Image: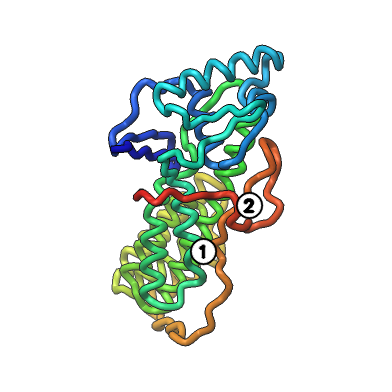
Amino acid sequence: MTATYTLQLLGGFNLLCDGAPVSGLTSRKAQALLIYLACTRQPYSREKLADMLWDATSTEQSLSNLRTVMSRLRPHLGDWIQAVRDTVTLADAAPLAVDVVKWEAALAEHGRPVDATQAARLDEALQHYRGDFLAGFHVPDAAGFVDWALVEKERLHYLALQAHRELAAFYEAQDMLEAGLRTAQRLLTLEPLDEAAHAQLMRLLARSGQRAAALAHYDSCCNLFAAELDAPPTAALTAPMRRSATSTFAPAEPTPASAPTAAPRYQLPQPLTPLWGAPTNWPPSSTGFKPHPSGW
């Protein structure tokens, strides 16, 4: 029976084989090569990969280092890393599921939530965003890889924020207060200085009868903004604070069930141009990713 591998990149780096961590693959350069090939699923010349992973050595030495790294991957991954003539790629048949690819595929299945069923599916997809792309993962002397990883981190973070904002707004409009609170709290975990999210959380707390908690949250916001921004909250927060104190929150108008469905907002990204390129369209399209049929 063929083993199934899972590459977890949201919140850090973790490679699993049938659910158990793969041991022995300790080289950061080898891990970085696997990450890059698994996320982009494109062939690259040896020179480009070598320059991406070793920016402080000569091309000849970098190519030698690349050969060494690929030999270190082989005991763990077999023939997944394929070197054909002058190019290196990840085999299409590699039994490797990548959480980033699967997460984006799930996100792309949903446009703007228009009913509770669709919102629940989007909520489930967002729960798999365990943290920022490659959080805490560092590769020395690999400027090309670091630049690519930073662009990916910011892009995925943006998609997660936008999805959480729309989902929280849907829950609030439908008066689904418990789900709205949960989503707003997740949003603030991703973006602690988002005033609109803080204001939304206060509204949801007040409307669910937790006015004291809403006012306490305002106090914590004042402390947070003073510490982080050296500034008081703006009217975006003081207005819901006053309404919380006077209990003047009215139920939100529900979103009509027959509202027309907007074009999907969560599109899979176009692959970046090799190494240091930037996305040609934002949000990008779905070309270049091949989700594996296995689970998360």
- Location of residue 234 with respect to 129 vertically, above or below: below
**How far from the left and from the top, in percent, is residue 104?**
49, 54
Query: What kind of element bears circle 1?
Result: helix
Q: How many marks?
A: 2
Left or right: 181 with respect to 112?
A: left
Mark 1 Cα-neighbour bin, 10 Å: few <14, some 14–19, many ≥20: some
**Residue at screen point 47% across, 60% down:** 107
Quadrant of residue 3 in the image? top left
**How far from the left and from the top, in percent, is residue 266?**
54, 62
Q: Which mark is residue 270?
A: 2
Q: Which mark is residue 196?
A: 1
First of labels 1, 2 by sequence position:
1
Q: Nearer the viewer, residue 123 or 164?
A: 123
Mark 2 Cα-neighbour bin, 10 Å: few <14, some 14–19, many ≥20: some
User: Which part of the image, by quadrant, shows the N terminus?
Assistant: top left
Query: What kind of element bears circle 2?
Result: loop
**How far apart, in angstroms, are the residues tagged by discs 1 and 2?**
30 Å
Amino acid under label 2? Gln
**Residue at screen point 40% across, 81% down:** 248
Quadrant of residue 272 in the image? top right
Amino acid under label 1? Ala
